[in-house]
Amino acid sequence: MKHITRASLALPLMLILTLPAAAAEKLSLNQISKYLNALKTVKGDFTQINDDGTISTGTIYIRRPGRARFEYSPPDEALVMAGGGQVAIFDSKSNQPPEQYPLKRTPLNLILDRNVNLGRANMVVGHSFDGTTTSVTAQDPENPEFGNIRLVFSGPPVELRQWVITNGEGSKTTVILGEMDDAPSLPAALFSIPSEMQSRSR
């Protein structure tokens, strides 16, 4: 009888010890908005899966609001920058000026915006939970033709894990994030498209 009693006590104890520290749950739009607005300057590695199935890797720098930098590792060695309201794509194999687009015309603007509010009418077109991560698909409610971005979060605590950008033509680009570290000393010049263009023209 004592053996049964001990076993019955040990079983729930073992279950408690094997439970994760914090069970995943569906994150609310308010939780996610607060997380993104609190995200200021970070740095980390990323893996990009392109629409044609090719894979690129590199380092990402984010300085909200409005600024991001994607440095691609060899053999790509490309550079994508967001700053000054523009997105610029630098091709390391070309001497031509970078392709540039208004940031507000890209879905990336939704997470770099000064005030992220996923509760805005018609902004979120998808909000789901798969038992591990929460996904939110958002678009510019005034310009849905610009495409959308699907953000994938773990938590709590909330942490951005990846995003999938679908542009206006339907092409998809997936960015999977590694560990993102706070980097409060990121200089503004790191996100200056004119400065980058000047340095490359020398």
Image (cartoon, rainbow, N blue to C red):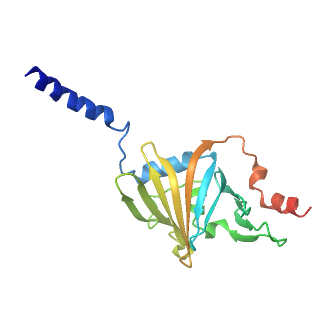
Considering every residue shown, the one lying at the far bottom of the view is 169
The relative height of residue 184 versus residue 188 in the rendered view (above or below) is above
Residue 77 as seen in the image, left or right of residue 32? right
Q: Residue 12 appears at what percent x and percent y?
A: 22, 32
- Residue farthest along the top direction in this orientation: 2
Q: Picture coordinates of residue 123 (x, y %)?
A: 47, 65
Residue 115 falls left or right of residue 60? left
Residue 161, image x, y percentages: 51, 52
Among the 4 quarters of the image, the one containing residue 76: bottom right
> In the rendered image, which quarter is residue 89 located in?
bottom right
Please provide percent x and percent y for residue 169. 56, 79
The N terminus lies in quadrant: top left
Q: Residue at x 55, y 49 (%)?
A: 37
In the displayed structure image, the side of residue 182 where residue 93 appears, left or right = right
Image quadrant holding the C terminus, namely bottom right
In this orientation, does residue 113 appear?
no
Count of numbered circles on the image: 0
Q: Which residue is rendered at x = 74% and y = 55% of the image?
A: 191
